[in-house]
Image: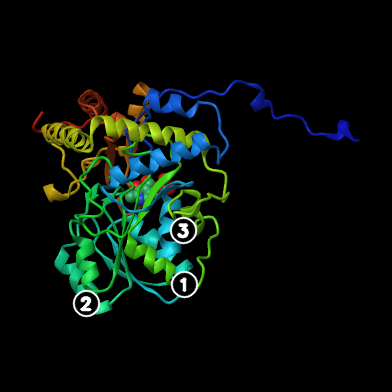
Amino acid sequence: MHYQSVSAAPEVLLRPITVPHKVLMGPGPSSSSPRVLAAGSLPLLGHLHSEFVQIMDECKAGIQYLFQTQNKMTLAATATGHGAMEMACGNMVEPGDKVLVATNGIWGSRFTEMVRRHGGCPVIIEKQGKAFTHDEIERALAVNKPQLMFITHSESSSGLLQPVTNLGHLCHKYNCLLIVDSVASAGGVPLFMDKWGIDVLYTGSQKCLSSTPVPSPISFSDRAYQRFLNRKSKPVSYYFDLEALANYWGCDGAPVRRYHHTGAIAAMYSLRESLAVLAEEGLVNSWKRHADCAERLRNGVRRLGLELFIPEPDHRLPTILAIVVPPGVDWKAVSAHFMKKYRLEVSGGLGPTAGKIWRVGLMGYNATLQNVDKFLQVFQESLKLQGYSPSRL
Ligand SMILES: Cc1ncc(COP(=O)(O)O)c(C=O)c1O
């Protein structure tokens, strides 16, 4: 044995971990409640222990409520939002499939890339910072005849809310299935998977649910599951294979659940508690709370003489608000002031909106009127430091 030749333990790990308390009011993750964090520190269970399976079942019921769906194929992928996106793509897209990707920010671009990697043929319709109308979508469906369509309900890079009401029914008219990304909206904005005919819907846990970034809720309609069963080839990803995960989650009615991967045990406890918080508050009350906070913030921003990035009021996302950076103001310095003096996170833009906007997240645990007032007070202070003098102050 050459014990002497072992390298030294890293110095940094011989000190206690330091995690400052910050209020996360960017586009995500949002801060977790103490209750959700406490759940994550409960003792680990085995991933197939009956008590853990029970918690998975409770999560499944909570996700069905969150998405307003009765779908059997409802579960949470052991991954962040990107993983759920990859799972949606990988199980639905086969080589050669035509996928209509409605892009109005960065998420459509990312899905396009995933479609390509899975051998599909993306057909892109693009509109930056603006929502697609049903007429525009219908034209694209009629002309391109895709097998699948992807759209982002909540474009977090620009604060855009894309209406998807009944969009699935429109897609079905053209023999197309609809995949919707609701990472920044589920729980904070009205969303009805079954009523609106959505075939694959996923979200993240760290935004309106205020849980840890993993796992990510996802649900497949009967139509989507049928499409999966009719695949000519197996999905490329073993990890995200719907058949295996459906069994692990008890969605397939099989008498035995088999080991597929070790579930994110502690994170699942947190997800369960975040869904319990939602169930106790009620979805409608949660949607209203997010809408009230957003309204208060928008009014405050207007009083400061600033402009909201999304011009159309009905297309402004209540969960992530985008404020235009006025000329002569250094957006980074404003965000830095929030963080340095108040440990409060407010982000800049992303992708096409980088440098043009601030993004303020009011999601889940953080969506309170007190947080809005705090934000507005600090915002005014930071803008003054930047020499900004609003005409309407
Ligand atoms: C709309 C949207 N989709 C997908 C994602 C990806 O989620 P994650 O960063 O958890 O992988 C995000 C993350 O911000 C998002 O806002």
Q: Looking at the image, can residue 333 be seen?
A: no
Give how far apart the Cα atoms at labels 1 and 2 are: 23 Å
Q: Residue at x 24, y 55 (%)?
A: 194
Q: Extreme front residue here?
A: 255
Tell me which amino acid carries mark 2.
Answer: Ala
Query: Would you name the residue on which mark 1 appears?
Result: 119
The CB of the residue at mark 3 lies under 8 Å from ligand 1:
no
- Depth order, front residue of 41/9: 41
Disc 1 and disc 2 in contact, CB within 8 angstroms: no
Label disc, if present, on residue 171 of the rendered structure: none
Query: Would you name the residue on which mark 2 appears?
Result: 142
Q: Residue at x 47, y 29 (%)?
A: 40
Which tag is nearer the camera, tag 3 or tag 1?
3
Q: Helix, strand, or loop for circle 1?
A: loop
Q: Helix, strand, or loop for circle 2?
A: helix
Q: Extreme left residue here?
A: 392
Tell me which amino acid carries mark 3.
Answer: Leu
Question: On the rendered image, what quadrant is the N terminus found in?
Answer: top right
Disc 3 and disc 1 in contact, CB within 8 angstroms: no
Rendered location of residue 335, percent (x, y): 33, 33
Rendered location of residue 167, percent (x, y): 21, 61
Tell me which amino acid carries mark 1.
Answer: Gly
Q: Residues within 10 Å of mark 1 (few under 14, many from 20)?
A: some
